[in-house]
Image: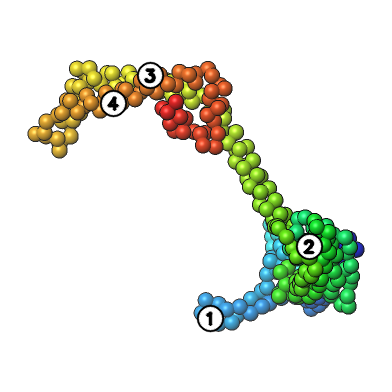
């Protein structure tokens, strides 16, 4: 697998860091100058023009809350002045006083941008390398201005030589055109392979497959871990279903007695729309008997899982982790 030489990787990071720091410091300097001039005039806030609900431009105080929560500067605001004794003072977002640079944030972003650009360079070269190829020489160097160019030499599994010519040139987007509001690097590539042809999967394809598989494995592990949290509730299901089956059996046996049939008949005729209709005793006995038979089947089949944690554990998994899943497994066991 091709990795960009450390010296070139460091050059990218240092250059981004220097330019980004300069951009943020320039913004902080501009803000500090503007706010100092406001204070010198005895003013407590700046104004800006905005459209009102009538579509007219009106002058309103400028609120600096967004600037305080974004970017790579720390803003210190004045506090509101108490108008009466005991009044709580709060941050006055209309009156920023000074700002300083968040150098740690700048450094983190520079590292992130460099890592992104380096990753693009490496993926471009690895897209030309078969997994059976061997790199024998790196000849990459800094060119004039924003450029890394050169070639990577290697041999195939059959000892045939090849050469990958590549160059990366980069530029910067500033201010509002940049991703972070200050400065971001974007790169362009040219690359080609000459000599021995590339055979089989590329290093990039293999790395991509490995990454995809790693994500799948991580997701599966997460699902299994979450599912294990259900085990405590799942392991008591055999006893619950056994007791449920007992209740169902008693309930439906009672419904088949003369008293139970009479209760069903009374309930049937208690609805006005059943007046002058006939209560079908045989239909009642048929469906109640079916329910009774089902409950007895559950009662019989759940016995093998009572006080038998290994058997219950064998059923427990992503496809069987709740009451209805378990009942289905019991029925089909």
Name the secondary structure under disc 4: helix
Closest to the observer: 127 or 161?
Answer: 161
Task: Return the residue nearer the eye: 314 or 192.
Answer: 192
Residue on which disc 1 sits: 55
Q: CA distance from mark 4 to mark 2?
A: 69 Å
95 to the left or right of 317: right
Upstream in the sequence, badge 1 or badge 4?
1
Q: Nearer the viewer, mark 2 or mark 3?
A: 2
Labelled disc at residue 246: 3
* Disc number lying in front (1 or 4): 4
- For the residues labelled 1 and 3, the Cα–Cα distance comes to 74 Å
Nearer to us: label 4 or label 3 = 4
The quarter holding residue 329 reads top left
Secondary structure, mark 2, is helix
Which residue is identified by label 4?
290
Tell me residue 172's x, y (percent): 78, 74
Residue 316's spot in the image, x, y percent?
54, 30
Q: Residue 122 bears which disc, if any?
A: 2
Q: Earlier in the sequence, mark 4 or mark 3?
A: 3
Residue mark closest to the camera, 4 vs 2: 2
Label 4 environment density (alpha carbons within 10 Å; few <14, some 14–19, many ≥20): few
Q: Residue at coordinates 62% horizontally, 37% vertically from top-left?
A: 225
Earlier in the chain: of badge 4 and badge 2, it is 2
Q: Is residue 105 left or right of residue 209?
A: right
Q: Considering the image in quadrants, where does the N terminus appear?
A: bottom right
Q: Is residue 324 above or below residue 289?
A: below
């Amino acid at each position: 697998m091709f990795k960009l030489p450390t010296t070139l990787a460091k050059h990218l990071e240092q250059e981004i860091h220097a330019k980004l720091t300069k951009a943020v410091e320039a913004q902080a300097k501009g803000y500090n100058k503007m706010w100092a001039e406001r204070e010198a005039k005895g003013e407590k806030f700046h104004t800006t023009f905005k459209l009102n609900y009538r579509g007219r431009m009106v002058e309103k105080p400028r609120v600096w809350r967004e600037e305080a929560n974004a970017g790579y500067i720390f803003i210190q605001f004045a506090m509101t002045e108490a108008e009466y004794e005991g009044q709580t003072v709060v941050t006055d977002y209309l009156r920023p006083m000074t700002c300083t640079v968040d150098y740690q944030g700048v450094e983190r972003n520079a590292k992130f941008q460099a890592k992104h650009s380096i990753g693009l360079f490496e993926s471009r070269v690895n897209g030309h390398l078969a997994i059976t190829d061997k790199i024998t020489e790196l000849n990459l160097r800094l060119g004039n201005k924003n450029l890394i160019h050169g070639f990577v030499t290697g041999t195939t599994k059959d000892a045939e030589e090849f050469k990958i010519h590549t160059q990366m040139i980069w530029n910067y987007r500033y201010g509002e055109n940049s991703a972070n509001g200050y400065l971001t690097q974007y790169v362009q590539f040219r690359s080609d392979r000459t000599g021995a042809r590339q055979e089989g999967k590329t290093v990039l394809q293999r790395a991509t497959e490995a990454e995809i598989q790693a994500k799948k494995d991580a997701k599966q592990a997460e699902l299994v871990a979450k599912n294990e949290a259900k085990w405590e509730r799942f392991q008591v299901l055999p006893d619950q279903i056994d007791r449920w089956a007992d209740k169902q059996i008693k309930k439906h046996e009672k419904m088949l007695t003369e008293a139970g049939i009479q209760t069903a008949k009374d309930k049937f005729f208690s609805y006005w729309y059943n007046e002058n209709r006939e209560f079908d005793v045989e239909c009642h006995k048929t469906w109640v008997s079916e329910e009774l038979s089902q409950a007895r089947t559950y009662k019989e089949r759940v016995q093998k899982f009572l006080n038998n944690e290994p058997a219950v554990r064998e059923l427990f998994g992503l496809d069987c982790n709740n009451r209805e899943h378990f009942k289905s497994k019991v029925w089909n066991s």
